[in-house]
Amino acid sequence: MNEPTDKKPNFFQRHKVDWVLAIILLIALGLYGYGTWKTGSANDFYTSAITSMTQSFKNFWYASFDPAGYITVDKPPVALWFMAISAKILGVSNFSVVLPSVLFGVGSVYLMYRLVTPYFGRFAGRIAALVMTITPIVVADSRTNNMDATLIYFLLLAIWMLQKSINKHNMYWLIGSFATIGFAFNIKMLQAFMIIPAMLIFYWLASNDSWKKKIGKLSLATIALVVFTLSWPLSVDMTSANNRPYEGGSQHNSVLELAFGYNGTQRLLGQTTGTGGAFKGMGSSSSKGSNQPGGNTKSNSNNKMTPPSGKMGKFNPSKNMKSRGNFPGGNNRGGMKMNGKGGMGGAGGAFNIGTAGPLRLFQSALGPQISWLLPFSIIGMIAAFIGFADPKRKWYQLTTRQKHTVLWTGWLVPVYGFFSVASFFHPYYTIMLAPAIAALAGLGLAAMLDLFKRFSLNNYKAYFLPLAIVVTAGLQAWYVSSYYAWLSVLILVVAVLASILLLVFKAKPAGKAIVIVGLLSIAVAPSFWSLTPTLAKESAAIPTAGPDLLTSGGNNSGGIGNGTVNTKLLNYLTKHQGNAKYLFATADSGTAAPYIIQTKKAVMAMGGFNGTDPAMTLSKFKQLVKSGQVKYYLDEGKSGSTNSTIVNWIKKHAKKVSASEYGGSTSTTSSSNSMNFTMKKGASAKMAKPTGKQSMSMGGGPSNMSNGTLYDLSSIY
């Protein structure tokens, strides 16, 4: 007879650790974090702000781009707060500024599991977490100091609170959920509001309260949303302009204008302010007509593209560029491909967003970043609504599982709709679709497997799974075809054979193994694409994923140690700065950022990111020069700046500093941010190796090279 034992269960027994989930989380950590300490770049624009934010609380609160607190970045500060805290603790480095994004990315994978598992089972939760992990743009984005990984985490946290409020019938969780959305607004503004319709519909369907109580609780939650949304913007806008930095990205020094203008309606309708600088006409329409960039780009007889002369002066990507191979829904199967450094590898350029329309997300400009499993998720979503229905209820009496399917459908549909018609966004913004695709893939697979088991081949419900595998494989084969023709054929053949064998051996033991083979056939390509940023040690201002990164040796689109600082010029400026407040002034942040990062000193980017913010007037600039606060101006010949009046005054009255005085040459070519242009048929074209001569800057602002003319302003007075 065994004696009773008083031994207590250990930690793992108490918490029932899911070891499969643990492995998925480790994979996510490796994909998102490995090599970030070795990358030569991040987003200069934000890294400069993080550098400045570590120097004073005022800079920290306002997200000042420069240490002097002259102008802010064009986003709210919350995501940068986490990065600045990390940099303050660990020191400013590529690793420290990216670390929060890595952790939030892994946290999002865990939340996907927690959001799906309680309602659809552990298997569905694992699939959702895995799909989130291996979505290429999620990997690329989580390896940068952009805001998107942080935003996604807090949106998922809000959904978790919403589910908890319904399960526990607790109003405070509901209020916390909407307050978290308000908090997320101060990460990336109106982008956070894209899931509010899904939250409202889900709460209304899932809550057991009376309609009066629902309205009352939602009213309180809305108040919390408004308070948390407006708390930081109003604190800025109500502060005297003399006591804070200029709000970058706005035309009237207002956060609310920035939120509802540049970062709001203009994202949908096209950019109408701040276009006079580097990206003229940026986002004014979706990609129509010629796929060639504007400016002086010409096409020769060999289908090679000659890069535009100079900097990004009249580059018009969104308007004049089609995606590479716009099928489906496009009108050019041999579109231009922008590749090389600066975020152009993989599936398109910084503003290469394909042709607007319902199939835009399947085109090659955006598809290889986000849409590998989108057909699977859509078919799975339909199967879920059918498979999780209760035959004893009327069609509109939804089950719990159907209601949760509505939640993720409500996330997918409006975000999908936005990207189908929007005119002004970067391809990496499509990370907003990743949680919905992942959740619907997980719950959809559970539904399709259940339908496949329960129904005979005489019923259409048994065909959802093989159909999803074949359709998804077909899209993936097209994406892969221009890189690896053999893999394209292999994916399609294995997927089709697996689907046929599924039907042949439906009721036999071999069926389970065939399902696994079929699912693996559509997991290989996105897994490899998601691995490319890690293999290339990629951490870019314009993150992307794809084999191009492996041929270009990574993406050095601006950042710490990227070689864009003219050392001899810097030594000259440091030696002659004296008591001046600013090391020098220049037109935009792209020129200023590397110097701020390297020296921790103030550099004035007069017009902010694009050089188009009206933050400085001629009279005020004259006062700064006269008082000795600004002694030098570095002009890189950028046209279209809002500050052209100031620049003309400088050129007329200031003394040019000969490059020979600081031991340099009249121009310095950056070794980073090079882009080549090649034409190739198919979904995507293989990338030519970048040449150092054909440079176009994309990191941290429109111009990111230390070329140009230096003017001595102290000679004026």
Image (cartoon, grey):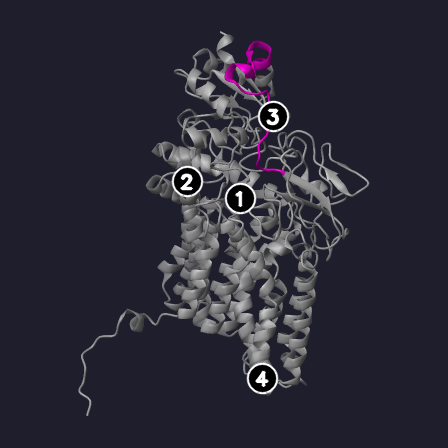
Callout 1 amino acid: Ala
Q: Secondary structure at mark 1?
A: loop
Q: Is residue 664 magenta?
A: yes
Q: Which mark is residue 93?
A: 2
Q: Left or right of 500: which side holds 443? A: left
Q: Nearer the viewer, mark 2 or mark 3?
A: 2
Task: Of the two numbered discs 3 and 4 on the same chain, state the one appearing first in sequence.
Answer: 4
Measured in 3D between alpha carbons, the distance from the residue under mark 1 to the one under mark 2, in whole angstroms, is 14 Å
Callout 4 amino acid: Ala
Question: Which of 244/319 is in front?
Answer: 319
Question: Which residue sits furthest right?
Answer: 301
Task: Of the two numbered discs 4 and 2 on the same chain, state the one appearing first in sequence.
Answer: 2
Residue drawn at x 43%, y 12% is 627
Task: Of the two numbered discs 2 and 3 on the same chain, state the one appearing first in sequence.
Answer: 2
Task: Of the two numbered discs 3 and 1 on the same chain, state the one appearing first in sequence.
Answer: 1
Residue drawn at x 60%, y 20% is 644
